[in-house]
Image (spheres, rainbow, N blue to C red):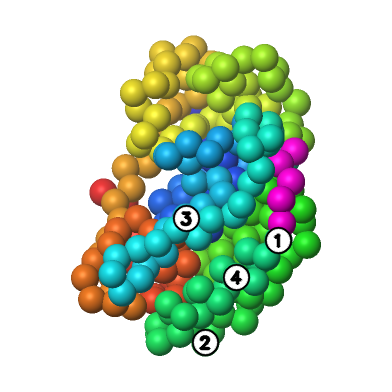
Amino acid sequence: MTGEPMLRVAMHQPNYLPWAGFFDKMHRADLFVIEDHLAFSKGKECWHARNRVRTPGGWRYLTIPIAKEYEGRPFNEVFFRETKFKKQHPRIIQNLYSKSRFYRKYFDDFCEIMLNKNDTLAAYNLEIIKWMAGCFGIKTEIVLSSELDFDRTKTKTEMIIEILKACGATHYLSGDGAKDYLAHELFPRNNIILEFQNFVQARYSQAFEGWVPNLSAVDVLFNTGNLNLSRTD
């Protein structure tokens, strides 16, 4: 790979109002793939249709209602059961963050982006992701996995390799949670350098007393106005 231009690629499913680690990974990549071809899940550890925001007593979920019939369908084929949440969630944010330092700077635009008319989960979340990335000054190019040419019959690490090859990646930036399930040996075999994010959520002042880490990055945005207080070690 000597002399070859470096292209660091990261990827993630189209989460709803993602946390700071999502945007840190995007910022560190040259190209960010939104995996909209993957299957939607409503499992406990899934953040595709929900995320957490700060409350006086700790935190609460903001959840997009998704009909059970869409379980296991690709994100770009998951349609909304109803769209009341597009107005309800901004009202909740208003009640919780109206006294935050950067509330006035971002809230009107936040309401507007939440009302975007996309009717699939992937497209809706992508608009919000792009807006939040712009607020954080992130200029990384974003592509959709559904628009890439790769072998969709592959699974796990092999599928990741296929996507990376379709992008022309020289480096793959993975989240730390994948360390245990990735087949590490496949990356050098395909001339791709595997890297891990090693993200740590730095502490910052929140709207209420106490500290709750790893909330939606809207908490970082309304309280700090930037992503500088989120770091990697």
155 is within the stretch colored magenta: no
Question: Residue 47 location, x and y as percent?
Answer: 49, 46
- Judged from the image, the secondary structure of the residue bearing numbered disc 1 is loop
- Judged from the image, the secondary structure of the residue bearing numbered disc 2 is helix
Q: Residues within 10 Å of mark 2 (few under 14, many from 20)?
A: few
Question: Which range of residues does the magenta coloring cover?
Answer: 77-82
Q: Which residue is mark 4?
A: 88
Q: Determine whether 50 is above or below 197 in the image.
A: below
Q: Which mark is residue 8?
A: none
Give the CA distance from mark 4 to mark 3: 14 Å
Of the numbered discs 1 and 4, the one sitting upstream in the chain is: 1
> Considering depth in this image, is 54 or 169 the residue closer to the camera?
54
Of the numbered discs 3 and 2, the one sitting upstream in the chain is: 3
- Quadrant in the picture for residue 185: top left
- Quadrant in the picture for residue 139: bottom right
Question: Residue 61 location, x and y as percent?
Answer: 45, 58
Amino acid type for the residue under numbered disc 2: Arg
- Kindly identify the residue that appears in the image at 42 percent across and 39 percent down: 45
Q: Which residue is mark 2?
A: 104
Q: Determine whether 3 is above or below 30 in the image.
A: above
